Image (tube, helix red, strand yellow):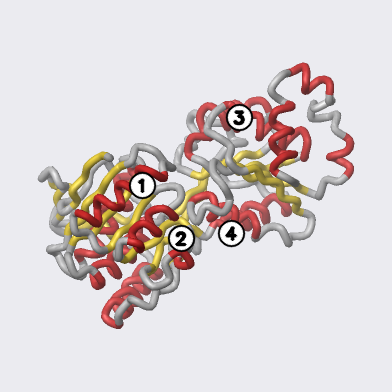
Amino acid sequence: MTDRFMLNRRQLLKTSAAGAALGLASASFPISRAFAAAATVGFIYVGPKDDYGYNQAHAEGAAALKGIEGISIVEEENVPETVDVQKTMESMINLDGASLIFPTSFGYFDPHMLAMCAKFPDVQFRHCGGMWDKAKHPMNAGSYFGYIGMGQYLNGVVAGHTSKSKKLGFVAAKPIPQVLLNINSFLLGARSVDPSITCQVIFTGEWSLAVKEAEATNALVDQGADVITCHVDSPKVVVETAAGRGAFVCGYHANQSPLAPEKYLTGAEWNWAKVYKMFVDDLIAGTPLPNFTRGGLADGFVKMSPLGPAVGEPARKQFDATLAEMMKGGFSVIKGPLKSNKGAVVATEGQAFIETAIELESMDYLVEGVVGSTA
C-alpha cells in the first residue's frame, strides 16, 4: 500500500462528512473486507521506517510477520504524536479491518490510543512503553517493552576498553527514566573496565532533532570524548558525525554498523520480531493477549550488534563473559556502593537492583561520573 494512499485515507477521515460519503463505518467497507486476511495487524511509526533507529527496529519486527499465513500487515510511517495518529488508527480499523494495532511511539498512548480503545472496544491495542496500568486503563489496551539498559552496559564495557581519553559522550533526547538508566548503564559498564572513566551527556530536548544531535556530537568530541553513543530516535546523525570526527561509536535501537564500518564498536538493539510473533501467535490461537509484556537479553527482546573490527581481544573477552552472566538472569547494573552525580546515595554496600525493579523504572538521577547539560 503506497504512502500516498495511506495519507489520503487519513485525510478522508478528517471530517465526518467525508467519512459518511465514502461509507467508512466499520460495518460498511466491503472492498477491504473482501480481501482481508484472517487477521490484519497495524503498525504506526512516528518517523521513517528506514531511520537506522527506533522506527526501523519496529519495522524490522513487523517485516518478520509478513510470511505468516493468514496475517496481513498494514503500516504507516511519519505519523506525528497528534490527533493524526487517531485518524490513522481509525483508518486501519475501518478500511483494513485491523484487529490488533501497535502504535509504537511514546506520545501515541495518552490521549490518542486510549481514545481509540474506548471507541473500538473489540480491537486490541498494544503500545511500546511502560504506561499501561490495570487500575485505570482499558483491557483492550496494553504495553510491551524491553530491558535494554544491559545492552548499554555492554556498550560501555567495549567503550571502556577502547577509549584513550577516558572520556565518553552521550547524546540524549529527554531525561526520562528509561534514558537516564541507559546513560547510567553505559558509564557503569565502562567503569567496570576503568573506574576513572567519565561520561558527558547532552540533552537535545526532543526525540528527533538532527541539527541539535550533530551539534551535541561535535561538542562532545570537542570536549575530548572519543567514544559516543546516544538515545534518540535515529542515531544516524550521531553515528556519522562522530565517526567523521574520528570518534568511535556504540549504536542503539538498530544496527548502524553500515554507517561507520571502521568506527562502530557494537550496539544495543531491539529484537521486536520476537515480541510481535508472540502477540500474533496468541492472536491466531484465539488466546487473550497479555496486557503487560517485558523481557531482556535472556528473553530475546534485546540483542547486541556484532563486535566491530576495532574491538580488541581484552574487550571481546570481557564482553563475552559479561553477556554470559546476563543470560543467566539476575545481573545487576545498579549496585552499591553507588552515589548520584549530586552526591546522594542511590545504593548502599551490598544493595543491588536488577533492571526489572520498580526503583529503576522511576529512576530520576544520574550516577557519579556523569556530567549532564542541555543543548
Q: Disc 2 or disc 4, which is closer to the eye?
A: 2
Q: Which is more toward the observer, 109 or 140?
A: 109
Q: Which mark is residue 213?
A: 1
Q: Amino acid at mark 2?
A: Glu
Q: Earlier in the sequence, mark 2 or mark 1?
A: 1
Q: Amino acid at mark 1?
A: Glu
Please, is residue 328 above or below residue 12 in the view? below
Q: Which residue is mark 4?
A: 273
Q: Is residue 70 left or right of residue 239?
A: right
Q: Disc 2 or disc 1, which is closer to the eye?
A: 1
Q: Report how far apart the C-alphas of labels 3 and 2 lie in the structure.
A: 28 Å
Numbered disc 2: secondary structure: strand
Q: Which is more toward the observer, 365 or 372?
A: 372
On the image, the x and y values in percent for residue 125 come to 61, 39
Q: As drawn, which residue projects farthest toward the front?
A: 244
Q: Earlier in the sequence, mark 3 or mark 2?
A: 3
Q: Which is more toward the observer, 362 or 108?
A: 108
Please, is residue 154 above or below residue 70 in the view? below
Residue 305 in view here: yes
Please, is residue 257 above or below residue 172 in the view? below
Q: Which residue is mark 3?
A: 84
On the image, the x and y values in percent for residue 76 come to 65, 43
Q: Is residue 88 left or right of residue 243?
A: right
Q: As drawn, which residue projects farthest toward the left?
A: 343
Q: Residues within 10 Å of mark 2 (few under 14, many from 20)?
A: many
Q: Earlier in the sequence, mark 3 or mark 4?
A: 3
